[in-house]
Amino acid sequence: MRCFRNVGLILPLAAALWFAVAASGCSGDRTPAAKLLNRAVDAAQQGKWQEAFQLAQNVLKREAAHPEALVIHAIAAEKLGRIDLALNSARKAAELHPGHFAAQYTLGRLLCDRPGGAAEAMLPLERALKARPGDLNTLLLLGRASSRVNADNTIDYYQALPDAWRNRPEVQNQIAIYYLARRAADRGNLARAKQALGTAYKSAPNNPEIVHNLALFLDHYTPDKAKALGFYNRYLFLIGGNPELNPERARVQARMRELQR
């Protein structure tokens, strides 16, 4: 069976970037390190990533372990496409400052969507949540990462979200995937997965990935093949003639022909 699709969540960098810069001294330069750091934050807010990168780097030349400078350095490097450098700075910040929210969150975020990185992302994200209990973006990332490693406590992160966020279609889609993966452990999980998919579809009937997931569920886990066909048709309508989706379109069309025999 085709795997269900994960619907992406948009997690703002602001959760890790916009923090108060503590005053710090300097030597050998007329510009205080704290002022350089404030300039780096301002540059980042304006999307001037090269400038933010250089300013953060200047601070790190004086204070190699400065947590905020390491975080800005990591985020700016990421935005400049220098992912390995971003990870290096984020790892250093997280290792040196285990109780620092932005350091832990930034490393967890960078690792979360990296191939094979979800398992490694769990520790810094757990530390970020400990530093800032109930943080929305951290909970969302923990839900995403833990679902990818099939962790037993995935649902706890989603349940900790405020209702308005827990009921968002992309989150309900993730919850459905969680319950579906555990259908053998609890007979009620299949019904819970169906309910979550229904909630997601009700909120986002024009989201092609959610429509596709609902079609797959109806096709493979219910006897209602006619309804599955209807959602497959809707999915094909929603993706239109997008050439990038030609392989998926062909698979769906082939499955529809099988169901119609």
Image (tube, rainbow, N blue to C red):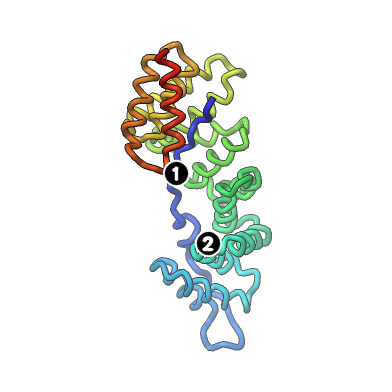
Q: Secondary structure at mark 2?
A: helix
SS state under label 1 = loop
Residue ID at (49%, 18%): 220
Nearer to the camera, 190 or 27:
190
Kind of residue at badge 1 = Leu
84 with respect to 205 (left or right): right
Image spot of residue 97 (x, y percent): 64, 60
| Residue 141 x %, y % | 52, 44
Residue 1, percent across and down? 54, 24
Residue 43 point in image, percent of width and height: 43, 71
> Could you classify mark 2 by the number of other residues whose Cα lies within 10 Å: few (under 14), some (14-19), or many (20 or more)?
some
Check the image and report above or below for 161 versus 226. below
- Of residue 188 and residue 35, the one placed in the foreground of this image is 188
Disc 1 crowd, CA 10 A, few/some/many (<14, 14-19, 20+): few
Residue at position x 52%, y 46% in the image: 138
Report the quarter where the C terminus lies. Answer: top left
Amino acid at the residue labelled 2: Glu
Residue at the disc numbered 2: 78
Identify residue for label 1: 9
